[in-house]
Image (cartoon, rainbow, N blue to C red):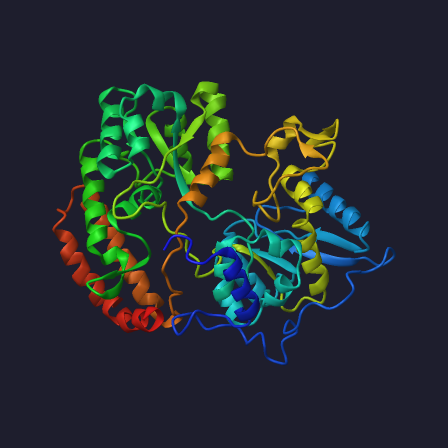
Amino acid sequence: MKKLLSFALALAMMMGCLAGCGGGSTSTPAAPSPSSPSSPAASAPAGDGTIGSPDAPVEVHVMVKDVFPNEEDVQLLCKAINEKMAAHGQYVNVIFDEPPASGYASALPLAVMNGEVTSDLIYFQGGDQAVTQQGFLEDLTPYIASSTYVKDLMDETNVAKLQSYPYLLWLAPPRTNTPVMRSDWCEQLDTYDALIADPTIDNYYAFFKEMKDEGLVEYALTADGDTTRFDSVFNHAFGVTGTIIKEDGKWIFSKASQAEKAKLEFYAKLYADGLLDPDYLTNDWSVMEQRFYDGKAAILVGTAGGTIQVYDTKMVSVNGEAAALTVLPPAKGVSQSYKSVDVTKESRGIGINADSKNKDAAWAVLEFMASPEGRILDKVGIEGVQYNVVDNKIVFTDKFSGWWARFWDTTYKFDPQDPSLAEPVLSPAAQESLDMVNKYLTMDTNILIPDEMTPQWDAMNNLYNEYATDIITGVKPISAFDEFVQKWNAAGGDQFTPILTDALG
């Protein structure tokens, strides 16, 4: 499964085949066909690249979570975009609209569908499928096909997601969790070298047990409500290689598989032996992270790249340079990978409002922000504020730590030359986490859940959460997993069988 398609082949396929939405009969109903004559996006964006005029710039309204128009950084960003694009004959006036103050993921889709949000570019963090089904989002295929910079920054996961769902784009590393630990503690453990040389399940257990037995920490792993973080380390080792796997010649959801049973039995052993934070179910993210910084938990599993950067910076600030983080490998067994990357669709990303009167200008903003000039602005900030240029090198100021990309978070191919970077944007641990994700990248086998099956899917997952929790914490024995599978199938698993067979063969 690893790297299922070469990037070049997948990109060619996308450009030739992305005109339709959906991955077969299991996909949720799509918006009106983008190839229909009534669709304004049926052909590539027109024009000679010039937009607006100095006296009449085209307004491009943007809505992004946690980006507020009254913030100084945001105002400076808009000003810089307008000025830099004007230098290329593209006269725009970028305006960030006020996002919902709370519950963005649920509030935004409703606001778009009832006409309260009319921004040209809209960032979604869930809930976008209902918006797409009603035709509110533009098919991005023709824009990407005619682009220069956006297309160049797409990795193979972006390509795969857009093949199935061409309405959201998110140029960022796959949201894959990687485990990290203080480097100075790794060096104190006799089992560390064996783990790195051969990260089997047994060697991981020995590593965890030594750190607790030596009194280094209270427990090896902590989390914030479920096993998602642990799964990124151990799923593949036990054979949970995708959301859907083949068992006894039949496609099934892996949560009801014998591989999942073996994994839960291992988690139950970790819990019984005091190697899992006993409060992992009730911790919120802030408690979880504090236990890591305070040294109660040895390992924290977080999103590769930016999140690991935050963990690394905070750990060093609290415990000194020797505590800089080391990235640990995924466990090795049946397979070896961090949790498979779902490529059915982007779980978050930017879309173009289908009702926008300024679609070409909106896309031009996205294209500019993917250009070398735009990427420096997006990733590094405003010259004279987040950085200065000294001897033709970008030198960060103290304000750089508070800057974050409002458009494209990816560091893929980010290597500015004129001016160049005096120091990397990412810390060694953050960069290593991205490198490790790329090394062990596996794409998921999954489907989009049909709308009519959503109640069954929710009931099935509620059952899983109940039984998984009880098995891990010792309330139920591992033998209860067989009872769970029966209930899972009755709740909807059996109904999914023909759907999975039809989708996956």
Farthest residue, direction bottom: 37
Left or right for 135, reference 263? right
Question: Along the line of sight, which residue is nearer the eye, 288 or 273?
Answer: 273
Question: Along the line of sight, which residue is nearer the eye, 272 or 502?
Answer: 502
Task: Give the position of the N terminus as an image quadrant.
Answer: bottom left
| Position in image of residue 398 (x %, y %) | 64, 26
| Position in image of residue 65 (x %, y %) | 57, 49
Q: Can residue 320 be seen in this view?
A: no
Task: Give the position of the C terminus as an image quadrant.
Answer: bottom left
Residue shown at the point (41%, 57%) measured from the top left: 4
Residue shown at the point (29%, 31%) measured from the top left: 195
Question: Measured along the vertical axis of the image, is residue 312 above or below residue 30?
Answer: above
Farthest residue, direction right: 55
Left or right for 132, reference 44? left
Question: Measured along the vertical axis of the image, is residue 220 above or below residue 350?
Answer: above
Determine which quarter of the picture holds residue 167: bottom right
Question: Measured along the vertical axis of the image, is residue 496 above or below residue 370?
Answer: below
| Position in image of residue 186 (x %, y %) | 35, 24
